Structure formats: C-alpha cells, structure tokens
Image: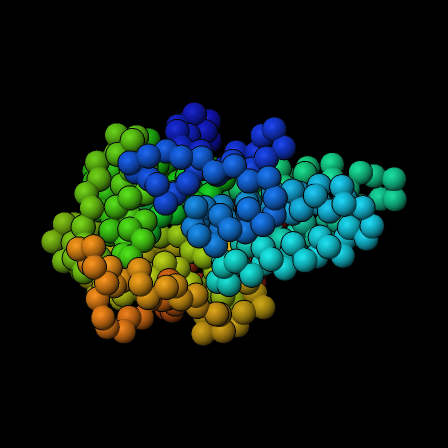
Amino acid sequence: MRDRLLAAEKVKAIDWRDGALHLLDQRALPFREVWVRCTTAAEVADAIRTMAVRGAPAIGISAAYGLVLAARERIAEGGDWQASWEEDYALLADTRPTASNLFWALKRMRDRLDRVKKHADPLVVLEAEAIAIHESDREANVVMAQLGLERILKHQGNAQALLTHGNAGALATGGVGTALGVVRAAFLEGLVEHVYVNETRPWLQGSRLTAWELAGEGIAVTVNADSAGAHILKTKGVTWVIVGADCIAANGDVISTIGTYQLAVCAMHHGVRFMVVAPSSTLDLMMVTGEDVTLEERDPGELLDVMGQRLDVVALNPVFDVTPADLIDVIVTEKGIVERPDTAKLAKLMCRKRLH
C-alpha cells in the first residue's frame, strides 16, 4: 500500500527548490493554480497569516523553511545573527495561534540550531532539518493512511460512504494527507462508494479544496452545505466521518476546523463512527484539555459580504472549535491508533517510537 499511495500522489502544495519556498496558493483554488514564491521569513509569515498555505502540518513545514530563509538573511547581515533570527522565530510563531504543528516545527528547528557543532555551517544544518520535517510528514501520512484503512476494514469490508469536513488532504500536509490519506487508501482498496464533503464555510475548504482533490483522482464526491451534515448522516448510509486536527489536547479533545464539533455530535446520535487523523506533532501533552487552547477568530467581514455588499450587522467568525474526546471513536497517528482516547492512552502513545 505504501508504494501505491506514493505513486498516487497528484497534488503537491509545498516545494522547496532553488533556495526558495514555493507554495500552491490555496486562496486561488480550484479555478487557478498559482504559486507563491517566498524568499524571506516575512513572506512566509504573510503566506501563513493570509492562508495562502493552510492546514496544520503544512503550516509547520512552511514555518520550518521560513526559519531557513531567516537564517540566510540574518547571516548575510552579519553581527549577532541569532538574536535577529529569534525575531523571525517570533514573527512566524505569531501567525496562527491554534496550530500545534507550527510551534512543534519551530521548536524543533530552534533545538537543532542549539545543537550545531562549532565548525558546522548552521544554514546547511537548518536546511537539512526543514527538509527532514517535510519528508517525515510525507512518510507519516502514508503510515496513518494504512492504519486508518485497517480500522475501516476491521468494521466493514465493503464499499461504503464516508463524510469529511474541512480539508485535511495533500493541500494541508507534506504528503497524501491525513484524513484524505485514509480516504485515498480506502479508495485504492475499493472500499469507497462515495465521499460527502461539507462545504466548510466561510473559507469553503471542503467545496474548493477537498472536492477538487478527490474529483481529480476519480473519487466520487458530493458537496453539501454544512447545515445538511446531520441529514446526510441520517439518510445516505455514511459509516465513517473522517477529519483532521489542528491540535489535540492531552485528554483527547480535538481542536479542528469550525463545524467539526457539531458534526461529531450528529455522528454519535446516528451511530456513525468518528475518526480523527493527525500526526503526533499535533498532540500537545502540555495542554490538559481543549478548553486550554487559544481559539483563533478571523475577520467578521468574511461572513458579511453578500451579493457584493456588506451586511450592517455584527458577526462572530471563530475558525476552530473543540470536539470533546468522548465523541471520538479513534485517533490515528503515525505512532499508532488510540480508541476512545483519554489522557492515559495518549500519554502511552506518545512514549512510542514510530511504527515504521
């Protein structure tokens, strides 16, 4: 399955080449494929902040490359370049407050710099570390896809309907995706009859991005309004809801794209299994519960532009919500699977090395 999944990679959202970071601009999809070229940490920070790149793993990978660009610029300036580099670190850390992978990747880069030997070239070392973060995520996607597939096979071995929310695919990661990696693996095994995709307002990650990814690979996909999610679960024979995560607390609470929480409630009511797929870098064991996270809110104007005009009312525009652990059937990571997650199970998981 690993080779089949890697061979099936058709979407690449992050490309490090010629000393620059190239990002597939997700604001332009699905109608135009535009690449943003970043040569400074400030440009990477802007790309993250404005959601040219999005998805927790992709944000972390991009930030790691951003620190490589920062080091190159600061070393060229001379003087105490590491002090200036810390300013770039803070700039990147401030872009998206909820994505655990962002802070994990930045810390890994800083830790690697702290271990640079006296005569080593720090720029070479940092670039190698960023590339390793990128490649590690790609491999983790494959492992998670295989584990998620095994879980689907365990419960039902024939073609079935799935539902997803947001975009946790190749556009959001360094590989085939987290949630969509599992969907892709299931499709390759002939286990996917249909995929229903919540449109995911207000950024429409589902209709613009996820549907585009799946349709491009010949997977039968139907977009529905977010408010139709419960109706879909009730009437369309969906067996699994499969989503990604931007952060997972120590007790198993999942912070993900707004609308995930209500979908989990509906899934439990209708007896539909709920799977969360995310790399271990998304788990934050220092965060006791999901209530401890800073939930990002964006410009209310994203909700108020209607038919080319701005509504004169107050709007609330949270980007993420918290899905309690007791609504989740299984969390899939590259380190293994946790059923009915809780603090003890996740702590044990994080003590493991990778399965592969």
Instruction: Name the residue rendered at 58%, 50% in the picture.
Output: 42
Q: Among all residues in the image, which is located at the extreme left?
A: 235
Image quadrant containing the C terminus: top right
Along the line of sight, which residue is nearer the eye, 341 or 16? 16
Residue 263 screen position, x and y as percent? 27, 61
Residue 312 appears in the picture as rendered? yes
Instruction: Name the residue rendered at 37%, 64% in the picture.
Output: 299
Residue 336 screen position, x and y as percent? 50, 50
Image quadrant containing the N terminus: top left
40 vs 124, left or right, is left
Residue 280 appears in the picture as rendered? no
Instruction: Name the residue rendered at 48%, 70% in the picture.
Output: 294
Residue 73 screen position, x and y as percent? 70, 43
Along the line of sight, which residue is nearer the eye, 79 or 324? 79
Tell me if residue 320 comes above or below residue 61 in the rendering: below
Query: What is the number of callouts on the image?
Result: 0
Q: Among all residues in the image, which is located at the extreme front?
A: 309
Name the quadrant containing residue 195. top left
Tell me if residue 315 comes above or below residue 8 in the rendering: below
Q: Among all residues in the image, which is located at the extreme right?
A: 118
Report the colour scheme: rainbow
Residue 351 screen position, x and y as percent? 61, 57
Instruction: Name the residue rendered at 63%, 59% in the picture.
Output: 90
317 vs 309, left or right, is right
